[in-house]
Every structure is written in C-alpha cells, then in structure tokens.
Image (spheres, rainbow, N blue to C red):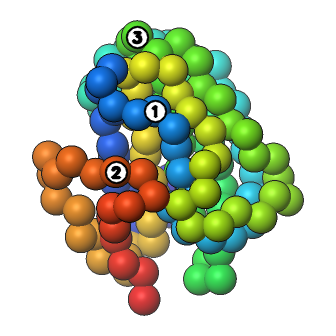
Amino acid sequence: MDGRAGRRISIFLSILDVHVNRSPMAGRVGKVEYRRGRFYNAMRSRASVDNEQNIICLETERGEIVFKQIAGAIARRVVCWKRPGDEVKLGERIGLIRFGSRMDVWLPAEAEIVARPGQHVAGGVSVLARWR
C-alpha cells in the first residue's frame, strides 16, 4: 500500500456473513481515513481502490500494518468505532460494514500468509498470517 512492499489478504463478506470487523493485531491506532467512493461488487479488484472505505493504520510492536473496511454493491456504509490513539487488542471489535463487503489487510513482505484462497475464515478466531 502507498508504494511500500507488502502482501494483501482480501476477505469477502457475503450478505450471509457476520460483518463485524476485528483488529488483526494488538497495537495503537495511528490513523483512520475515510474515503468516499463507488459501490462496486466487493469481489472486484477495483473495489479495493474505488469503493467507499475506511483505511486504518495500526502501529504494532513489530511495525505498522494497514487494513481497510470496504463497502460493496449492497453495503452502503462502513463504520469504524476506533479513533487515532486508541489501543486495541488482538481480535477486538473495531467496526462493521453493512452487508456484502470486503476487508483488506496489508502485511509486510516478510509475513507468512497461512490462510488459503477460498478458505472460510472467522473474525477473532482464524489465523491469516504469521509475522515473526
């Protein structure tokens, strides 16, 4: 993201999934940036760039990670309950997206992604990656 080397994990949330978003790591919220945008289907690659979203920068003991709440074609609202300076725990609820949406998580290039394409994951339970 922003020209930095790294890897992205995209998680699509269908209208049947729980849309509460959780922090992928413990740390301090450095920035929350709301961006107005389109409402393309969240499975389209352009949704990560063009759709309405909140970009959240999280300062962790290992460095910064960035994740996005992305509204989809049916979802028309992203909600973030955290503000810059807030401390969050691993798996803590940070917000929600209204029905049919996507969550992108950017990790440093050295992170080992353990989740597999098509795997069903659950917020606060599933391990997406290991960052040593």
Q: Residue at x 24, y 70 (%)?
A: 114
As rendered, which of 55 and 91 lies closer to the eye?
A: 91
In the picture shown, does residue 69 fall above or below 88? Answer: above
**Identity of the amino acid at label 3?**
Ile
Mark 2 crowd level (few <14, some 14–19, many ≥20, 10 Å Cα): few
Q: Residue at x 51, y 38 (%)?
A: 20
- The image position of residue 31, as x and y in percent, is 75, 51
Q: Secondary structure at mark 2?
A: loop
- The image position of residue 89, as x and y in percent, is 65, 67
- The image position of residue 72, as x and y in percent, is 41, 19
Q: Nearer the viewer, mark 2 or mark 3?
A: 2
Mark 3 crowd level (few <14, some 14–19, many ≥20, 10 Å Cα): some
Residue denoted by label 2: 122
Residue denoted by label 1: 19
Q: Residue at x 34, y 67 (%)?
A: 127
In the picture shown, does residue 122 fall above or below 103? Answer: below
